[in-house]
Image: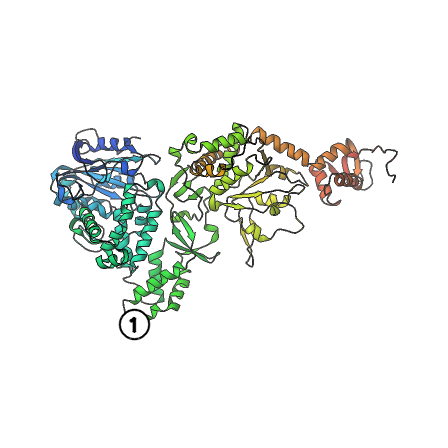
Amino acid sequence: MHANYSPKATKDQGPLDRPMVFTRFPNQWAFEKKEVRGSLRKLADDIQAKTAKSKDKLPWIKAATFGEAKSEKGCYRTNDNVEEVHGVEGDHDAGTMQPEEARDLLEAARLAAMIYTTPSHTRQKPRWRVICPFSKAMPPKDRYRLLARVNGVLKGALAGESFVLSQSYYAGGVAGRPPVQTFLADGRYLDEAADLDAGAMGKPGTIGGKGGTGERLDEAAALEAIRTAENFHVSAIRLAGHWAAQGEPLLRVGEKLRTVFNEVPEAERDARWYERVKTIPEILTHVYGREVSKAAHGVDDDLMTDFDEIWIDQHPGGEEPEFVDELAGFDLDQDGVIRAFTDRHVGELLFDHNAGRWFRFMGHRWQREETQLAKHYARAVSTDLASRDPKAKALKNVNVWEAIERGARTVREFAFSASGWDSDAMLLGTPGGVVDLRTGQLRPGQPEDYVSKAAAITPVPLEAFDPERDCPRWLAFLGQALGSDASAIRFFQQWAGYNLTGETREQVLLFIYGPGGSGKTTAVSVLYDLLGEYAANVATSTLTAQRHEAHPEELARLHGPRMAVASETEAGSKWAENRIKALTGGDPITARFMRQDSFEFRPAFKLTIVGNNAPGLSDVDSAIRRRFMILPFDHPPAAKDEHLPEKLKAEWPGILSWAIRGALDWQENGLVRPAVVEAATRDYFAREDTFSRWLEDECELIPGTATLTAELFESWRDYAYRNREDPGSLKRTFPERLQRAGFEPVKNRGGIRGRGFMGLKCRQREWSDFDGLV
């Protein structure tokens, strides 16, 4: 990918093409350094070309010259060691501005700059860095003032750590992630743009770097920065200070920090992650005080000193975390508390009025809250506000907290209904993010996705997915079970991918049959298990004819899942054909849970049925023919591998990626039914279509001749009973079947007196001499 050059970019020796000085560190620890020279245009190309397995393997760059002094840990990258600065760097991780918008703002201000995206950048959550060059080397003390010019142009979009003198950033892409993009803005050198001082914006919380009020911490952005491994250290410190300011106890803040660090995907847990998890007690030391943390965690003085060094290295002047009074301005009554509750927790909580439950956004999705967290939050806000005025002590009462929680349910920002969950049929929740099945790309989950379910595993990113490496046993297993039929394997892959989606437009079910040990149950169980919350079991009795109708609760369980599996079909059973048509037709279904009101939902599930025996059909009409696909698993292995399920579980991430590829194939080509499916389905209907066999065996087709309906029904009834089939009724189902078969109903025509059908008559039976004798 080439850099996204602005229309004004030129190839002369202007700010974009004139070489400038950078210091390159091999990693964040900066035990070594090297000065390099190059233009911003050349740097843009180099960043795009650089790729590593993980972020901690990427080099770090800084538009500054460093001396030879090291910290006690051997790090060159400290504030005191900066000798000259040759430009400024800024970081945007709040996700509120696209890099193209930033480029346009810089060009409008006539500032030369290069912007590059980070590996965590998405269109939904943009993350990028900006570098602006100087015309000459400048003293370190001028960097803050000059960066404030850039932040003003960018409307305060830069993160606070951008203003740390020695702050450096990694540069390059990560394998398996979207490639880095770069954007060039043509213009003047930053140090020659004194006119921008009037609108300069310093570190968030200041104006022009001289104090004043500013933005509060974006808690969701800070949490996301940790979850996506974008920024560990500064985000953890800010969150600890933020929660401490809210009155959260020390142990609770430690628990919350560890929780969010544990949400970082395994693949992203590099050396930075382990180092920062280890320093959580030190962060709490800084925020809550030395003695309190010592008592709670047993932190020794060496660790405290070590934390102080880290803090000083990263923060000029050793400034404290910023504490912003978030509750200022709210009235000290119940309505004021509800408003403060809303301000503090909007985007984190929703109340589902159908389920009567609070949901909390955690780990890329909304999860049902079972611990009365909302009431705890109501208590925290109430007591925080009550502490401001002795006259507001009533806010500390339990009944007030309960009233606040109940009142918050009605706030529009929290109010939600069941129909809103998982409404985007092409988004798949996973522990490591949300997969957009339109593209197959994995990205961080957003509250506005309204995803409430998750698969059991995070897939291998498609860019890095190699089936032969990531799921070789699965491929070998399917090759054995399906007789190395490539078209059958592709069809099963498409079916797996279709089941990842919430779409039901195919209006079909898949029946998989085969002898014991053929692999049919293993194949379906793997898909069922890795789909996690998107899969559900269906009682076979729900799909087969019973004396009594299935309880609506059985159908209610199918609200939400995308894969519904039934197994162990019994020999001699019959399909509940009308119900199967309803469940696969895509129309709304009415159901209810035990002792609750009925509700209506549109199904997202696809039926997969596994069995040794195929239940029978009473009426093989065109509607039921459209619904069924039958896939035989009839190549059992010579020897059964008892440990195969455990071996396949190790390949779940790759198998899920394999299924995602199937979803992409299905979207492009539809379900491509192989010859083996067409043949098996055709044979099944031929066996089950008793009515067509009656027409062939017991009737003659004679144009212009009619036969009374009663006479035809008597012949059909006898034939049906001999074949253990329900003949239906003379006046309704039998005439309907004849009409669907193409026969015309007539009255007093074709040689009959009464009602009948034109074009057929019953064959004359040849009686044996012993017929009718006892």
Residue 375 placement: quadrant: bottom left
Specify whether 497 is left or right of 554: left
Residue 327 image point, x, y percent: 29, 61
Residue 34 image point, x, y percent: 17, 34
Q: Which color scheme did the rendering employ for the protein?
A: rainbow
Q: In this view, does 524 lie above or below 208?
A: above
Which of 378 and 372 lies nearest the eye of the viewer? 372
Specify whether 93 is left or right of 765: left
Image point (18%, 54%), residue name: 211
Residue 324, visible in the rendered structure: no
Image point (57%, 43%), residue name: 566
Q: How crowded is mark 1: few (under 14 residues within 10 Å), some or many (20 or more)?
A: few
Image point (83%, 40%), residue name: 753
Q: Which corner quadrant holds the N terminus?
A: top left
Outermost bottom residue: 391
Image point (73%, 36%), residue name: 743
Residue 561, visible in the rendered structure: yes
Specify whether 533 is left or right of 630: left
Residue 691 image point, x, y percent: 72, 37
Q: What element carries label 1?
A: helix
Which of 171 and 124 lies nearest the eye of the viewer? 171
Residue bearing the label numbered 1: 391
**Disc 1 marks which amino acid?**
Lys
Q: Which corner quadrant holds the C terminus?
A: top right
